[in-house]
Each structure stands twice: as structure tokens, then as C-alpha cells.
Image: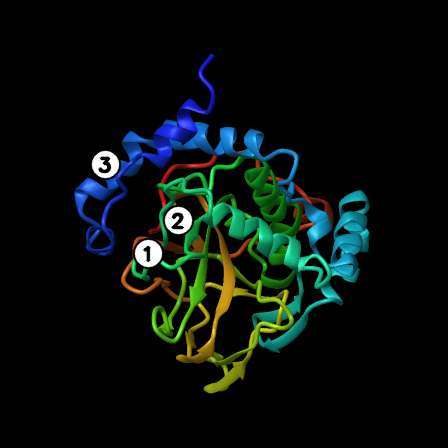
Amino acid sequence: MKHNNALAQARALSQPSREASLKREASVSHFWNNNRKLLEDAWAEWEMENKDSLLIPDETLLDPKLRKAINDAWENPEKENAVVDLWEEIIPGVYVAQFFDLERLADFRNYLETVVNSEIPRRAPYGIQLNRYGIMLDPRSEGHLAAPNFQAFYNDMMNRYMRPIARLLLGTYGYDNQTFGFSIQYNPDKDKDLHAHTDASAATLNININLPDEKFTGSQVDFHDESTGKTVQTIFEPGKAIIHRGNVPHATHPITGGQRSNLVVWLYGDRMQIPRGGASSYGNIGNSASVVDVTENISPRERWSVPDSPKDTFAPF
């Protein structure tokens, strides 16, 4: 009997250096691809080894009002307006709402801390320093968080929550079959800010996972309203999410104290298609995204459905 064979092997791997990762050297991609099955098996073994103490992430981590409105709408799509009512529009196409339950957020953060301490290699998003909470979330990404229970939660969040919300608020139906996600932590001495950019997504959901007593200074997010030319500044609050079209220009001010931790998840169409409204790119990537017209006159029943097309394997970064 091979006890924890994959887990031990994964922990013994020599992970690519930070410098090689930031340069995206070919050896880095080879490392993750060559060890993909081993790492997936290791995450499964890690879950089994810690099954008596490890949180099983599920929708009970999310805000009760949002959870009820979402579940009611899945049962009867005609009740979808209750979901809309929970979101406050900051500028046209940018909305904010409570996403995580503040009383359960510590449980989720403890889970992520256990993930970080697992000693299983995982890849941070390219272009940032390899901080503790920089993790790829989607199976399309090399070195993603492949723990089966986390993946079930991630897929549930994307399919049951983000996709219908984006369709309701942003009109992304038809260009939201594919998913992508990562986590990031802003620190004054590491990843401090993010310059003005747009995303290669039809919709971006950016969720703050700071605990209520985890204060930070700076790190405001500017959203540019192209219809008025004005910029609206917002500050992330614990457990709150901002959802917006990927083509809305936005930038993050430098963080000057404390830390800010966020989950960032995207939806876009097959072959990187996004709704019409301007080309998008995340930093220097994603320029291959094709811009298409948004399909109108979608019924509630169509909005509250899961695409049946397969997921592709292309990762934006």
C-alpha cells in the first residue's frame, strides 16, 4: 500500500525559482505540465489526510441574503430581481455587494492558510511576486489549487453565482462559457499596486477576503466612467465583491500599510470572445480576445442555466 505517495513526492519537488517564473521561462511551464497529475493526486491525498480537521468549502461561506436570492432564482428565474436588488451600481457597468458571510470569512481564510502550509507546489499569477496568497484557482492554469473539495466550491461559485449575476447586470450571456481565477495579496513591500488596465474578460468578479479586523491603508481602486470621463474611487471592504465588464478601465493605488487579499475570477466566451465595447487586456496579455456583439432579449430561464459546451485549456496567463 502506497501511503501518501503522491503527497510526499510533490513535497519533494524542486519548484522553479521566482526569477524563472517571472520571466516565464520554458522550463517553468514544463515543470507544471510534467507534474500536473502528480500534483492533482497530491491535493486529493492532502484532503484525505486532513479530512477530520479540514473545512469543506461550500456556499454556506457566502452571504445569507445573496445565497437565498440566488437559490430562489435557480428554483424560479422570475425571482431574479431579488438578486439585482443586492447590488449597488457605482458607475455604469460596475456593481458592489456583500459576497462572503462575515461570520464565516475566518473559516475560509483558515482554509487558505492550511492550503499555503500544505507544502504542495502551486503557481502564483505571472507578473506578481510569489506571495503567500498568490494561487491559480482554475484547472486550465498550471499549478492550480486542485484540491477536489475546493474545485467543487469554485465551480459552484462560478456556475451558480457569478455567471447568472454577470448575465443579469452586465449582459454577458453567450460570452461566459469559460472560467478563470486567481488569488492575490497586496503588500507594501511586495505587490503594491496595479496600473491602469482592462481585463481580457466578459466579466470580472473581484472579492475581498480580508477579515473585519485586518485593516489596510491605500489600495483604493479607481474605475473610469468612459461615458462621463469621471473616475470613481472605491475601497474594498471585507467580504464584498465588485463585478464589472472586463473592458472597464481600472487601477489600484499603492497599498501603504497592512495587507489586502482578494479572489479574482473571470468569465469569457469560447476562443476568448468578449462582448462588444472595446478591446481588453490584462497588463500585456489577453490581446487575442475577440470582441463581439452582446445577444439581447435573453429570457430569465436562459440566464439561469449552465453552458453545455466543454471547457477549453487555454489560460489567459
Q: What residue is shown with label 2? A: 272
Task: Inspect the image, locate mark 1, and give the three-letter code of the amino acid beneath it.
Answer: Gly
- Spatial CA distance of label 2 from label 1 is 8 Å
Task: Inspect the image, locate mark 3, and give the three-letter code of the amino acid beneath it.
Answer: His
Contact check, label 2 and label 3, Cβ < 8 Å: no
Say what secondary structure mark 1 lies in. Answer: loop
**How many residues crowd around disc 1 within 10 Å: few (fewer than 14), some, or many (20 or more)?**
some
- Which residue: 51% across, 43% down? 177
Q: In the image, which is nearer the foreground, mark 1 or mark 3?
A: 3
Q: What residue is shown with label 1? A: 286
Near-viewer residue (114 or 41): 114
Count the numbered circles shown.
3
**How many residues crowd around disc 3 within 10 Å: few (fewer than 14), some, or many (20 or more)?**
few
Contact check, label 2 and label 1, Cβ < 8 Å: yes
**How many residues crowd around disc 2 within 10 Å: few (fewer than 14), some, or many (20 or more)?**
many
Horizontal and vertical percent position of residue 299: 70, 49
- Residue 30's disc is 3
- Sequence-first disc among 2 and 1: 2
